[in-house]
């Protein structure tokens, strides 16, 4: 239990470090960059987060397959999976980087339609953000490998420090009068340094030869067979958590992005903190189910859901009761008026989405990535379907309503969880080990 609490704490730290730091620096950035500049900054950060999640969607597949390989004490296969995942993420990250660079002029024109003088700055920010996507994609390989070893402290310490440092540097540079381009170049340099350090730590754990990218047929096929669904799951997470800001930016301009982002920054940590704090459940249940069968995960899954619901209530209730006061204290009376009318809707939407976390991790651990990904993608598509008509009618409040309905739909994930736990057997055969085991090599 102590190990699980330790991993839960570091998982929560991994998520909380960035949004808490963002909350702290947002007033400084808004004051020195202005509403338009902060809107471009928020748009660039959202683009990095979206691209990183889409480009690193095979990280959960890497975690699941390495967790199974640990159960078989096969260090050779673990190294092969790390190399193959690195190869896949390099391909995806590079493709998205190039796509972002090509589309940056068009996107900048759309975002700055009300302020054409900012178009060049926005285009350059998007170019830098595209490079950061590649760094984050590679970093995910290191993080997912460490998580498969249930060693969250090693994976998360570097991540948290780098993310906090990037935002602190952004605030300092903004207060000193530096341009948005300089701010994002500094953020990209720090992101690259953090990625290199993460890879160094993985090399120390599983050997540095595992950091040579590879696309070996059998193991790549196993990663793709499982990872295509975790990639869809990551895509669904992007649709729910990030695309709303891009859609608002493209349709309503940077001022609307600022108003929506301020409320979303307060509400979104409800989902993110639950997902991060309970992430240890994924490799733990996968390892447990491989050793002792599906029946052995029923009780820990139930307990995790109770903890999940408790965490959601602890975070959501204060925001519903005191959210307007927090906004006014945080951003000032004038800026708070931009966001306070949509905050309750976003808090409830985030709470519903957070309640689905335990179900998604249970399905991933039991090899039911397809069911989890399809439900997540369906709820995200529902939000997109509703977003255009509702936003056209009610503006940013319409987007918040679309997110609320999507969050409610995400709870359907518990239907396949209930069926799988009743079935008492894994839906797929155990991992076929394609490499000879090296006994005693795992830590």
Image (tube, grey):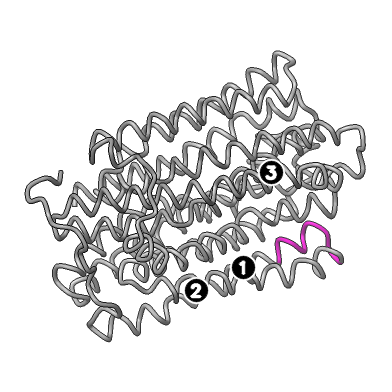
- In the rendered view, would you say 93 is above or below 200? below
Mark 3 nearby-residue class (10 Å; few <14, some 14–19, many ≥20)? many
Task: Determine which residue is flagged by label 1.
Answer: 380
Q: Main secondary structure of the magenta part?
A: helix
N-terminal-most mark, 1 or 3: 3
Using the numbered discs, state the Cα–Cα distance from disc 1 to disc 3 in whole angstroms. 21 Å
- Residue 61: image x %, image y %? 37, 60
x and y, in percent, of residue 188 in the image: 58, 29
In the visual, does 218 lie left or right of 275? left
Residue 75 percent coordinates (x, y): 18, 50
Was residue 372 drawn as part of the magenta stretch in this picture? no
Q: Circle 3 is placed at which residue position?
A: 262
Stretch in magenta = 393-401
Q: Residue at x 78, y 56 (%)?
A: 396
Residue 160 percent coordinates (x, y): 43, 34
Give the side of residue 403 with respect to residue 105, left or right: left
Which residue was labeled with disc 2?
A: 411
Toward the viewer: 38 or 336? 38
Q: Look at the numbered disc 1 and give the secondary structure of its residue.
A: helix
Task: Judge whether residue 398 is colored magenta.
Answer: yes
């Amino acid at each position: 239990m102590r190990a699980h609490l330790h991993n839960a704490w570091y998982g929560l730290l991994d998520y909380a470090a960035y949004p808490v730091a963002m909350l702290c620096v947002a007033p400084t950035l808004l004051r020195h960059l202005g509403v338009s500049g902060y809107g471009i900054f928020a748009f660039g950060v959202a683009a990095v987060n979206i691209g990183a999640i889409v480009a690193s969607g095979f990280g959960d597949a890497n975690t699941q397959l390495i967790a199974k390989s640990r159960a078989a004490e096969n260090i050779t296969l673990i190294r092969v999976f790390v190399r193959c995942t690195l190869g896949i993420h390099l391909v995806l990250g590079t493709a998205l980087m190039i796509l972002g660079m090509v589309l940056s002029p068009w996107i900048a024109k759309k975002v700055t339609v009300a302020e054409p003088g900012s178009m060049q700055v926005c285009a350059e920010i998007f170019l830098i953000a595209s490079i950061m996507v590649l760094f984050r994609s590679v970093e995910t390989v290191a993080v997912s490998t460490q998580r498969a070893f249930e060693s969250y402290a090693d994976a998360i310490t570097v991540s948290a420090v780098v993310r906090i440092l990037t935002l602190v540097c952004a605030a300092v540079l903004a207060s000193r009068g530096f341009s948005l381009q300089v701010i994002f170049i500094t953020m990209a340099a720090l992101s690259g340094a953090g990625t290199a350090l993460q890879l160094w730590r993985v090399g120390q754990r599983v050997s540095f030869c595992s950091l040579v990218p590879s696309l070996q047929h059998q193991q790549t096929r196993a990663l793709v067979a499982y990872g295509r669904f975790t990639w869809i799951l990551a895509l669904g997470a992007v649709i729910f958590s990030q695309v709303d800001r891009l859609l608002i930016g493209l349709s309503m301009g940077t001022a609307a992005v600022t108003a929506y982002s301020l409320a979303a920054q307060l509400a979104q940590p409800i989902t993110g903190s639950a997902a991060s704090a309970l992430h240890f459940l994924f490799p733990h249940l996968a390892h447990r189910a491989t050793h002792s069968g599906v029946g052995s995960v029923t009780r820990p899954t139930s307990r995790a859901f109770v903890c999940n619901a408790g965490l959601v209530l602890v975070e959501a209730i204060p925001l519903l009761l005191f959210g307007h006061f927090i906004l006014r204290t945080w951003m000032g009376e004038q800026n708070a008026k931009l966001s306070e009318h949509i905050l309750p809707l976003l808090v409830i939407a985030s709470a519903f989405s957070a309640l689905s976390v335990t179900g998604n991790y249970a399905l991933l651990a039991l090899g039911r990535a397809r069911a989890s990904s399809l439900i997540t993608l369906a709820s995200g598509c529902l939000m997109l379907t509703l977003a255009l008509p509702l936003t056209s009618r009610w503006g940013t409040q319409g987007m918040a309503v679309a997110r609320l309905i999507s969050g409610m739909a995400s709870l359907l994930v518990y239907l396949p969880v209930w069926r799988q736990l009743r079935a008492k057997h894994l839906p797929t055969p155990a991992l076929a080990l394609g490499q000879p085991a090296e006994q005693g090599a795992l830590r």
